Image: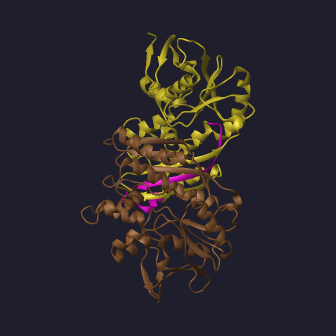
Chain colours: A brown, B yellow
Amino acid sequence: MVEDIHFSTMTTEPFHIGYRALAANISDIAAMGGKPTSYLVSIVIPKKWSAKSLHQIYDGMKQLAKDYRMDLIGGDTVSGKQLTLSITVIGTVNADKVRYRNSAREDDIIFVTGTLGDAACGLHLLLNKDQMYSDKYQYFLNRHQLPPQPRIDFINTCTAIDRITLNDVSDGIANELNEIADASHKKLVIDFDTIPVHTLLADFTKEQQTAWKLSGGEDFELVGTVSVDNWIQLKEAALKTNTPITAIGKVKNDAKNNGSVWLNHNNQLKKLDKSGYTHLRR
Amino acid sequence: MVEDIHFSTMTTEPFHIGYRALAANISDIAAMGGKPTSYLVSIVIPKKWSAKSLHQIYDGMKQLAKDYRMDLIGGDTVSGKQLTLSITVIGTVNADKVRYRNSAREDDIIFVTGTLGDAACGLHLLLNKDQMYSDKYQYFLNRHQLPPQPRIDFINTCTAIDRITLNDVSDGIANELNEIADASHKKLVIDFDTIPVHTLLADFTKEQQTAWKLSGGEDFELVGTVSVDNWIQLKEAALKTNTPITAIGKVKNDAKNNGSVWLNHNNQLKKLDKSGYTHLRR
């Protein structure tokens, strides 16, 4: 994560920079079905940064690491022009329970955890303090600054299920669903109205809501597919770990359109690009 | 490794930047007695860099990785102001053969592999092309740009030896010996004239030779201590793996001076600081 590209000190405190950066990496471990065990941190720090700010970055990481009993096992701190944070998280997973993007099958249920677009809304509020910014929306600010814990507990409660196709929502669900469709050579059909969002998101314009829920990144939720037979088991694991989970669509086998994602919205079926852009079938 | 801090594109080709950065990390694995198995690379790349140069950085790493059958298993490429290379190397080692800095005992022989100061001399030649620069010294240029392979094979041939105290020469032997003295709470006494250097180093001034052999970094050699009983075994492992090895001193137990390094030079015993600075006993 590089300053002014992946975060700005205008909207993010050092503590939150550390917390979010580690959360993003733990989320990658969740997306493989694993448990994080340790991490390494290399920081490039400009001379203008104080030792105190540097410690706050580490404190942000430590708070999250403590919950998973992860040890900081190495890394480096060097000086440079631009704050840069490079984290490696190491985790473990049973060889037969590694989750991939390429295992979706016809008739699978497509699911997503949590609510989408929260972090993107939070960032918007921080960048536009004069407009909608108010205490009412503190929830969204938190979701940008201190995102919820990656879904490690949930996915590790699903080990009885042989096959779960999985990805984590780091760039936006439009991108992540396309990765699954592409890797699995299947057509994914999503019901737009079922994509879970926080109720307060309705206060924003339709365009904002759509952009955030389809392309808002860094929610650190999981998106995936599971067979109809395993759907109940998956919901039980979600319940056990206090993980909101929602079915948002179905996997289809359609030789002409395998590898693509389609959005069912206002009774129209539109193709959903990686970027979140939709267009009618050509 | 950060551009203009750890390397300069004035003296280092992209291929060599990649090669050296990975070599430095593999050397850390050698210093623990391990074998590297895989690596992750995160690169921050300024927009002015071409895709070709970026590929050359990866090619430099791949050339070295191939020799150890290491897989590139992850990482990231992002844009930023300053070329920054963050590498994590993962390796394995039997739990009872991990090598540390804190295990030196009284009467141990202090040894070092290869020759010291070569990379520092190479860098000097590249920075001062008008002076000593000539084909005659190509050896030193190579040692700066394409350092020899880290001593993985050698140290993995020593697994029959229970205790080897070990460090790798990344910042200069003065620094690395002080780390061992400090961690082991012992006094290390080094014979200055036994420190191995390349014959051509004699062409340079006495001051340069001394500075480079004591404080020249990035030679990626190993320095350590071993009991007198195991010295023959260590030399046999060195012979088997074509690794030059030299005894350069002895470990002493001296309550007043444990934790420090002493240099026997011109019949004077001088204290050797981490920085390579020497001063008479006070």
B221 relative to B231, above or below:
below
> Is residue B16 something one can see in this rendering?
no
> Is residue B168 something one can see in this rendering?
yes
The answer to whether residue A123 is magenta is no
Which residue, as the protein is rendered here, is positioned at the far right?
B160
In-image side of A193 versus A182 (left or right): left
Nearer the observer, B67 or A180:
A180
Residue A128, quarter of the rendered image: bottom left
Find the magenta span and give its range: B32-54
Nearer the observer, B203 or B147:
B147
Nearer the observer, B119 or B136:
B119
The N terminus of chain A lies in which quarter of the figure?
A: bottom left
Residue located 62% across and 56% down the image = A34
The location of residue B9, given as percent across then percent down, is 40, 49
The answer to whether residue B39 is magenta is yes
The location of residue A273, given as percent across then percent down, is 46, 77
Which residue, as the protein is rendered here, is positioned at the far left?
A130
Residue A159, quarter of the rendered image: bottom right
The location of residue A171, given as percent across then percent down, is 46, 66
Nearer the observer, B57 or B257:
B257
The location of residue B22, given as percent across then percent down, is 54, 47
